[in-house]
Image (tube, rainbow, N blue to C red):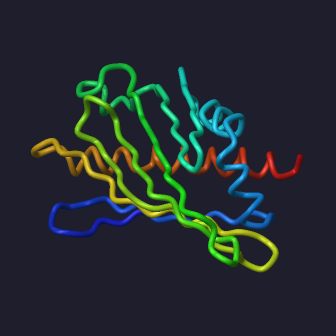
Amino acid sequence: MLSETGMMGLMEINTSLDFPADPGTVFDMMTNQDFLAEVAKEAGALEHTVRVDGMTTSSERVLAAPDAAKKFTGDSIRIVEERAWSAAEPDGGRTATLSLKSPGQPISMPGTVTLTPVGSGTRIDIRGDLTVKIPLVGKKLEKMSAPAIMDGIKAEERVALRWLQK
């Protein structure tokens, strides 16, 4: 779900994904370097680097820039996503601090990723505030960028569902 809020015109990114596995299994998957590399490929990365350092994951992807953004970014855009995970709660749930940035560009999306047990599975809630700080056109670029972020989340979901079937 996408929505606009706040005085600065933030574009909220709010979505949930459900997986047929317990939170521990989902966390192990989401902090697996091979999984992260597969997500980058599925998202259409022209180049990518992924790292796992303890409970922090980092994914750097170079993606083709949307046509409307090319005059600001060039033909491609570099996206760096970091998730710093908390320790597990007694029920296996946990939360990550999310940071999504584009180095050299006035684009950012701070937020959270929450793993919650639901029945015999796990729900992942992704919440973030997308901002593009360019006078006059920032709000328009936020609206154009939000679907690309949702496409990346859907790519992660597709890879996760295949991964969990292994």
* Residue 121 position by quadrant: bottom right
Q: Is residue 16 left or right of residue 90?
A: left
Residue 77 x/y as whole percent: 38, 27
Residue 15 drawn above or below residue 65: below
Residue at 30% x, 49% y: name it: 142
Residue at 72% x, 66% y: name it: 23
Residue at 31% x, 20% y: name it: 74
Residue at 63% x, 44% y: name it: 155
Query: What is the number of callouts on the image?
Result: 0
Give 113 or 132, whichever is nearer the viewer: 113
Q: Residue furthest left?
A: 135
Residue 64 x/y as whole percent: 45, 25
Q: Is residue 3 left or right of residue 56?
A: left
Residue 50 drawn above or below residue 32: above
Residue 67 x/y as whole percent: 36, 29
Q: Is residue 90 left or right of residue 76?
A: right
* Residue 106 position by quadrant: top left
Residue 134 x/y as whole percent: 15, 41
Residue 24 drawn above or below residue 121: above
* Residue 104 position by quadrant: top left
Q: Is residue 105 left or right of residue 25?
A: left
